[in-house]
Image (cartoon, coloured by chain):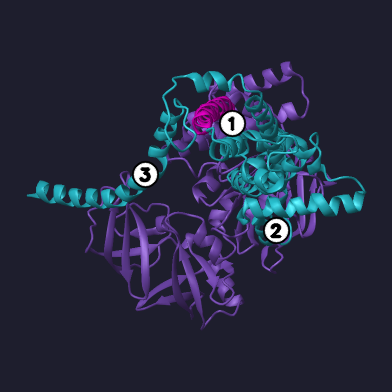
Chain colours: A cyan, B purple
Amino acid sequence: MANLATSKAGSDRNRTFLMILIPVLVLFVAFNTIPLLTGFFYSFTNSKGYGPFEIIGLQNYIDLFQDARVGNSYLFTFKLAVVSTILVNVLSLILAIGLSSKIKFKSALRGLYFVPRILGALVVGYVFTYFFTYIVPAVTGTDSILASADWAWIGIVVVLVWQACAQTTIIYITGLSSVPEDVYEAGALDGATGWDKFRYLTFPLIMPSITTNMVLVMKDMLMVFDQIVAMTGGGPANSTESISYLIYENGLNNSQFGFQCANAVLFFILIAVVSIAQTKFLNSKEEQL
Amino acid sequence: MASLSLEHVGKKYPNGYEGVKDFNLEIADKEFIIFVGPSGCGKSTTLRMIAGLEDITSGTLKIDGRVVNDVEPKDRDIAMVFQTYALYPHMTVYENMAFPLKLRKVDADTIDKAVREAARILDLEKLLDRKPSALSGGQRQRVAMGRAIVRAPKVYLMDEPLSNLDAKLRVQMRAEISKLHDRLGATIIYVTHDQTEAMTLGTRIVVMKDGVMQQVDTPTKLYNEPCNLFVAGFIGSPQMNFIDVKVSEKGAGVALTFGSNTITLTGPKAKALKDGGYVGKVVIMGIRPEDVVEEHEYAEGRTLSETFPANVTVYELLGSEAMIYADVDGGQISAHLSASSSVRTGSKINCSVDLAKIHLFDKQTELAIAH
């Protein structure tokens, strides 16, 4: 009798779980898994995105490695991602330490520094485009850096870093607040102050936050798209063409649907490999707390 | 090792709350001083002010004659053992203990020698490569002690170091700390709310309440001559019995009346009551449970009072002895009995008190009148 009651309660609970789970699963499969598999299929075709197509095997993948424009987009994207990830993490950590110290208006300042996170990337991109195109040249008397094939990427880095710092800082603040105060007090008595305190206590103890932030920011930066659309459209002379932007531009607008699907698959694998490698490496630096 | 001097030390928080008020204490070299008191009495705050983790808002703190109010914690040459141990979670036991020396740029050989010596004293030799997360509470506690020992500081501060351990381990570590004090010849200031720890470890005990120092004395003196009602009630377990008694003259002495019972008191205590003008007034009589004697108990060498009847409401057998809690006319009383006593819950018994052990307190000021 008791067993029966338990199993009935159990099945009721299971039904609740299923009711929560199934709609999400349906949506996820419909808008994520099916497009992914479809894209994977199209990567073996010469589809233009419309009309008839043929299956051409691995030809798209072979072509990818011989296409200079694709190669350039990979170089540009990785350069951008590495520089931005390092800058974002260094600046955010400094900001987080500042915002975790005993200062006035701490809550207000934390809120203020989070604002970039809630602004749309496109909006921010357009605002900074205006800033680089009109305000900076007016003040310095130089040309807009966005018009220079050599320097336009710096402008994009500035925007990316400015916006990404918001969330990264919050994660670092959380990490810093998880370090027990008594460890710092013991450190103060043992002589760990200033730089020693950061080097020997804070840094190793927030390693989990560093891992999270490095992986998240790197992934976001590799997938940079909105800022490119808003600021340069990939120019000048394709110098700021990110991988995502190239996939979108040539896949949907320039009839290379099949080819760019192959590019997307390659890109997906690369991001996965980079993220896993980062996690593995940084996890090995994390301490068992 | 070192002497400490706290002169009019106070702690006032920005919101106006005074955590510690006018604290004065001279601590000699090699003393084992205990700060004891209930939660929030300011004992930990005082310790943290000595450590430099809290600012001193008034008064002076001197270590070996040098004023250290504004000296950084690391430059005060003190080591602290925290209640939570505060070990560095990312370092091994060895690294934890070596850390303070490493920061002082001590050479590796000296560090190694100091760490291994401390590990030997504390029986940590086999655990040197472990991280704190892989240690038991007792082992972590020993590592925290080790980290303090390697520095050979002037003063050791210990903030309830045993309160997170289970009862058995606590007794064991208490003995270890006592041995350590003898061995190191160190000046130790130790905070606890456990009066057993205070009584067993301290050379002198500081009893605190609401940020105010109540009494500083040796354990024996504190137990036998508490200066006020709070100290009398705080030190000793189970706590001292307190009964309101009316004082009246009776021949050369005085009679202490509670309910329909009377105890006759002569000698210096009676004189103190008379001289203090307490005749005709109500005072508080304090008597420890071991000084309440049931009529069948062994009482040779004691000067007993008149007996008074009591109804036993609770009987607790503790093993080697028993405790009773009983109602008497005019109050309640607890008493120690031998384990062989036939008294049980519901028994009607006759008790008396050891006249030499009666404490008398003023009902208004709560200060001791006589012991």
Residue at numbered disc 2: A109
* A27 sits to left or right of A90: left
Type of amino acid at the residue the image marks with label 2: Leu
Type of amino acid at the residue the image marks with label 1: His
- Outermost residue on the bottom side: it is B280
Residue at numbered disc 3: A30
Q: Which residue occupies 59% across, 69% down?
A: B367
Type of amino acid at the residue the image marks with label 3: Ala
Q: Are marks 3 and 1 in contact (CB under 8 Å)?
A: no
The reply to whether label 3 and label 2 mark residues of one chain is yes
The reply to whether label 1 and label 2 mark residues of one chain is no
Q: Which range of residues does the magenta coloring cover?
A: A257-286
The numbered dot on residue B209 is: none
Is residue B284 one of those drawn in magenta?
no
Instruction: Provide the secondary structure element on which disc 1 rests.
Output: loop
Query: Could you tell me residue B297's position as x and y percent?
Result: 31, 54
Query: Could you tell me residue A13's position as x and y percent?
Result: 23, 51
State which tag comes first along the sequence, 3 or 2. Answer: 3
Q: Are marks 1 and 2 in contact (CB under 8 Å)?
A: no
